[in-house]
Amino acid sequence: MFDILCVHRRQGTDRRLNKDEYQLLTGSNGELVAEISRHLPEHLQDLVKEKLLAELEKSELISALRVGKVLKYERGRFRYISGQADLDLPMEEVEKLMRQATRQGEHQREVIISANGQKVFDLHGVPFDHRSGGLLALDITEVIEKERKIHRQEMEAYREAMSAVTGGRLHLVNGEEAKRLLSEGVEMVKGEARQAHDIPEARQVLRESLPGIASRRQHAIALCLSEALANVLKHAGGGCWQVRRVGDIVRIIVQDRGPGIKTSELARATLMQHYSTKNSMGCGFNLMLYYADYLYLNTGPLGTTLALDFSNVLTDKLNSEKMTERR
C-alpha cells in the first residue's frame, strides 16, 4: 500500500498520478525499460535496454540483501545489539572469526553455510581492541538464490541460442549431464596433458586405440584431441583426457580445473572464428566443431569438461573388416 503526497511535473504539481504514470510505475521491469528507451534513436535502443536491465538485476540483488544480526563481542561473550534476534547463527564459527579479528587487530570476513545447508551467512568481524569487537552477520541466502536464478536464465538462453546456431550440434550441459557423458559406454584409453610434449604422445595413443579406421577419419579425431589439449594447457595449465566407446560412437572427453569460460564470452569463445582471450578456446574450437558430430560443454569456476562425439566410427571399422574378410 502507498499514498501519493505530491506529484511534481514540469507544468505544475498535483495530488495524484495520471493513468500513464501509474501504469509506468506499476509495470514490470521490461515494460519500464521499454518505455524509457522508446524515444531513443533505433541504433541505441538495444544497447540502452541491455544496460538498464542489467542494472535492474543488480538492484534486485541489493534489495534482497538484509542485515541479519549485529552483535558485540567481548572476552568470549556475545551481546545482541540489533537486527533479527531469532537468526540462528553458527556460533562456533562466529567465535573463531571474532577471536581471529581481535588477535590480529584487523577486519575478518568469512562466508558460512549453516549445518542444515538452508542458510548462507556473510560474517564480518571488526575489532575494537585486543579483547572486544563487533560482528555484522548478513543473511545472504536470498542473494545467492537470486544470483543462481539469473545464472540459470542466462545459461538457458545461451544453451538454446548456441544449439540453434549450430544446428543442434553444440550443447551446453549442466553438471549432472556432464557426469552422464563421463559414465556412458566403455573406457578405451586415457591420459594426462601437463606439458606440450604430452600432446603428440596422446595423439599416438589415440591412434593405437583405433586401428582399422580410415586414416582421414582417424586424423580428424586426433586433430580434435590435439586442439582440446592445447586449450587445456593454455588456459588451465593441464588436464586429463579419455576416449570412450558408446555404441558405434567414439567419444573424446577432456577435463581441466581451470577458471572456466565466462558466461559473457561463451558465444564468442565457441562460435566466432579467431576469437581468443585468456578465458576462451580460440579458433581451435571452430575446428573441433567442424570435424565432430556433437560437442558437449560444461564450464564454470571449478573447471571445464568438453566431450566430442564422432558417430559411426566403429561401424565404419566393422564394415571395413567385413569387406577385407570377403576379399
Image (spheres, rainbow, N blue to C red):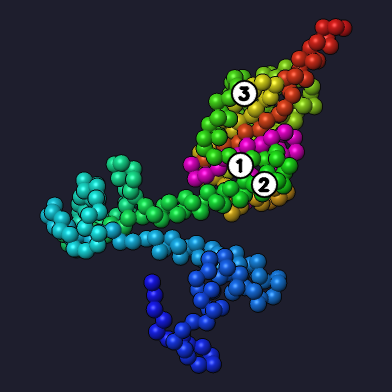
| x 46%, y 65%: residue | 59
| Image side of residue 164 versus residue 108, left or right | right
Residue for badge 1: 172
Q: In 3D space, how far apart are the residues under numbered discs 2 and 1 (Cα atoms)? A: 8 Å
239 displayed left or right of 318: left
Q: Residue furthest bottom?
A: 12
- Residue at horizontal 24 percent and vertical 50 percent from the top: 88
> Percent from the top left, x then y, of residue 260?
54, 45
The magenta region covers 277-302
**Residue 6 x/y as whole percent:** 42, 86
Residue sitting nearer the eye, 300 or 219? 300
- Residue 262 appears anywhere in the view: no
Q: Which residue is mark 3?
A: 244
Mark 1 neighbour class, 10 Å CA radius: few under 14, some 14 to 19, many 20 or more = many
> Callout 1, which amino acid?
Leu
- Amino acid bearing label 2: Met
The answer to whether the residue labelled 2 contacts the one labelled 1, judged by CB atoms less than 8 Å apart, is yes
Point 75% across, 19% down: residue:
315
In terms of secondary structure, where does tag 1 sit?
strand
Inspect this view and state whether residue 41 appears.
yes
Above or below, 281 against 20 in this view is above
